[in-house]
């Protein structure tokens, strides 16, 4: 831990990342509040859900592109500058009366920003390996997750406050300003990072021939799947993780639908309720990160996915019964398990696969686990237009029950 804290370069990049995350959280609250102000809320929720499906498709492509980009450091700065411009445009547009066309513009900008963010993450992945030594990486991942989770709690509380005192336009400009500060930090440390790269150059992945984007994605998916042979524990739980992502991803649109039709749901103020739900999740992540380093026995991925599946079931039972207490407790416990899984997984991955393919393989594995998310978001975008909230809740309770049954059966099969 002391090594991580004394690593000024790591701390600078961490602060830069957290600042941009803060802006994104405030903007997220603005979007949710904006949706609830529109008269045709169901259409707005459907549009938001559909737009959030698009970055799922692009994650692997951005990872491949990031691995093949040569001048990674300067390109990171350009991605930050792009997002400053994009959110400044949204800030101007949101000065007009709320309407669907402004929401459409804001969603388009958000998709472009997400693409830039995915690309930036892929660019920075191999650079980060030169900032923290191999033996310190697991500690770095655990520190990053724990501290970012604590900051996330503060960001959530601040976001819920800012939504009450700032206009939608000001919130968009606020997001743009956080990217400006992040870009300034990266510009200041650019020289030191450049020196690290000169001492230990990144080997850029180059594909010979005229490989199409589709062929490149297919080969990257194969590479990602084959890389899991070196981490069999993760490979055995891949389907379960896909299922969990597919079910949990509908929580946000389901919450908005319930709030719109039942204003008494939650704690009166929808944004405050949403902040408390996120707070419970973040506290769960922090607790999981701490438990990972304190537990004497090493829990397997199979056991952790089984526990997580159970809490997903109780989470959606909470939505079906519209019981916020059950939702908060289930969300917290589910995220405790997730908080234990993530640092362990990323440390295993970064210490196992070649660094010049790390972003591509990570993106490929992410694409596998997000296939369910993509299908689920597309389906829920239609469901909110056609079905009642109770019907949607029942469907996902049944799906969560099926997932739990599959995970238990898979765990028993692996034991045999």
Image: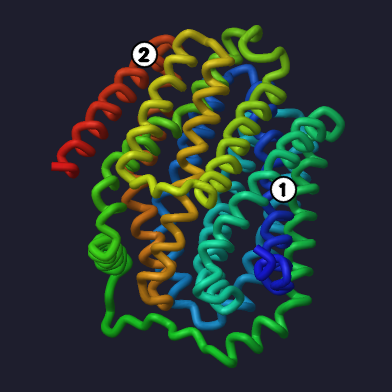
- From the viewer's perspective, is residue 204 above or below residue 342? below
Q: Residue furthest right?
A: 165
- In what quadrant of the picture does the C terminus appear? top left
74 in relation to 315, above or below: below
Left-right relation of 262 to 401: right
Q: Residue at x 15, y 39 (%)?
A: 413
Q: Which residue is mark 1?
A: 22
Residue 62: x and y in percent read: 45, 63
Q: Nearer the viewer, residue 306 or 365?
A: 306
Q: Which mark is residue 33?
A: none
* The quadrant where residue 259 appears: top right
> Disc 1 and disc 2: Cα gap in Å?
34 Å
Quadrant of the snapshot with the N terminus: bottom right
Q: Report the front residue among 13 and 280.
A: 280
Q: In the image, is 11 to the left or to the right of 231? A: right
Look at the picture and state if 356 lies above or below 277: below
Q: Position of residue 114 (x, y in %)?
A: 55, 52
> Farthest residue toward the front?
296
How crowded pointer 1 is (Cα within 10 Å; few <14, some 14-19, many 20+) is rated as many
Crowdedness near tag 2: few (<14), some (14–19) or many (≥20) residues, C-alpha within 10 Å:
some
Q: Say which residue label 2 marks.
A: 394
């Amino acid at each position: 831990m002391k090594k991580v804290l004394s690593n000024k370069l790591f701390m600078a990049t961490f602060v830069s990342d957290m600042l941009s995350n803060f802006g994104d959280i405030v903007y997220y609250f603005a979007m949710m509040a904006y949706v609830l102000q529109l008269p045709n809320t169901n259409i707005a929720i459907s549009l938001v859900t559909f737009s959030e499906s698009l970055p799922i498709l692009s994650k692997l492509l951005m990872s491949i592109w990031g691995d093949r980009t040569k001048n990674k450091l300067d390109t990171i700065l350009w991605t930050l500058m792009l997002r400053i411009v994009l959110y400044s445009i949204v800030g101007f547009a949101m000065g007009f009366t709320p309407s669907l066309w402004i929401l459409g513009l804001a969603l388009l900008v958000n998709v472009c920003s997400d693409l830039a963010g995915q690309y930036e993450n892929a660019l920075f992945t191999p650079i980060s390996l030169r900032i923290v030594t191999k033996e310190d990486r697991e500690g770095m991942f655990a520190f990053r997750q724990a501290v970012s989770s604590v900051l996330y709690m503060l960001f959530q509380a601040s976001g819920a406050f800012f939504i009450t005192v700032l206009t939608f336009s000001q919130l968009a400009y606020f997001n743009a300003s956080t990217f400006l500060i992040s870009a300034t930090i990266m510009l200041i440390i650019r020289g030191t990072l450049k020196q690290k790269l000169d001492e230990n150059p990144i080997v850029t992945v180059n594909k010979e021939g005229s490989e199409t984007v589709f062929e490149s994605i297919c080969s990257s998916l194969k590479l990602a799947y084959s890389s899991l042979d070196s981490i069999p524990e993760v490979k055995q739980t891949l389907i379960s993780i896909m299922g969990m992502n597919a079910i949990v991803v509908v929580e946000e649109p389901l919450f908005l639908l319930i709030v719109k039709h039942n204003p008494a749901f939650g704690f009166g103020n929808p944004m405050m309720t949403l902040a408390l739900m996120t707070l419970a999740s973040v506290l769960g992540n922090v607790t999981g990160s701490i438990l990972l380093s304190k537990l004497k026995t090493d829990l397997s991925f199979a056991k952790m996915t089984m526990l997580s599946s159970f809490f997903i079931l109780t989470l959606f039972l909470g939505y079906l019964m519209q019981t916020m207490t059950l939702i908060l407790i289930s969300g917290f416990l589910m995220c405790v398990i997730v908080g234990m899984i993530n640092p362990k997984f990323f440390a295993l991955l970064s210490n196992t696969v070649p660094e010049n393919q790390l972003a591509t393989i990570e993106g490929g594995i992410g694409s596998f686990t997000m296939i369910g998310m993509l299908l689920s978001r597309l389906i829920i975008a239609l469901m909110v237009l056609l079905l009642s909230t109770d019907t949607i809740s029942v469907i996902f309770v049944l799906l969560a029950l099926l997932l739990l049954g599959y995970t238990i059966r898979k765990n028993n099969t692996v034991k045999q």
